[in-house]
Image (spheres, helix red, strand yellow):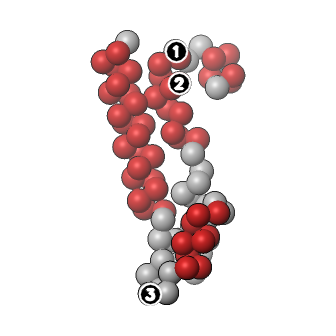
Amino acid sequence: MPLGIALGIPLPLLAAMFPAVNGYFLLPNFGPIIAAINFDSTGTTKIGKYVLNHSFMIPGLLAIAISIALGFVMQAIVF
């Protein structure tokens, strides 16, 4: 945020883009994600061959993209 303010990006746009810095779903290092993988007895929740190939990646990236899009829509309506 301080860098965005220093670059002159308006605050409503910074607020709309804030979900873009969420890295919880990109790397499987967040506690609940690791616990969900370990507790799953069906084997459907897993980390793939590569680190960036896990069950939470696509839903997490979609949630971040939708949050950013809704943030831009909301800032356009409010401001």
Question: Is the residue marked by circle 1 packed among few (<14), some (14-19), or many (20+) residues within 10 Å?
Answer: few
Quadrant that contains the N terminus: top right
Outermost residue toward the bottom in this view: 42
- Residue at left offset 52%, top offset 15%: 10
| Quarter of the figure with residue 65 | top left
Q: Is residue 48 visible?
A: no
Q: What residue is disc 3 on?
A: 42
Q: Position of residue 55 (x, y in %)?
A: 47, 71
Mark 3 neighbour class, 10 Å CA radius: few under 14, some 14 to 19, many 20 or more: few
Name the element at disc 2: helix
User: How far apart, in angstroms, are the residues tagged by discs 3 and 1?
Assistant: 47 Å
The residue shown at (68%, 24%) is 3
Q: Nearer the viewer, mark 2 or mark 3?
A: 3
Image spot of residue 30 (x, y percent): 63, 60
Q: Quadrant of the C terminus?
A: top left
Q: Residue 22 at x, y = what percent?
A: 57, 45
Three-letter amino acid code at the position of disc 1: Pro
Residue that carries the numbered disc 1 in the rendered image: 10
Badge 2 density bin: few <14, some 14–19, many ≥20, Cα 10 Å: some
For mark 2, what is the residue?
14
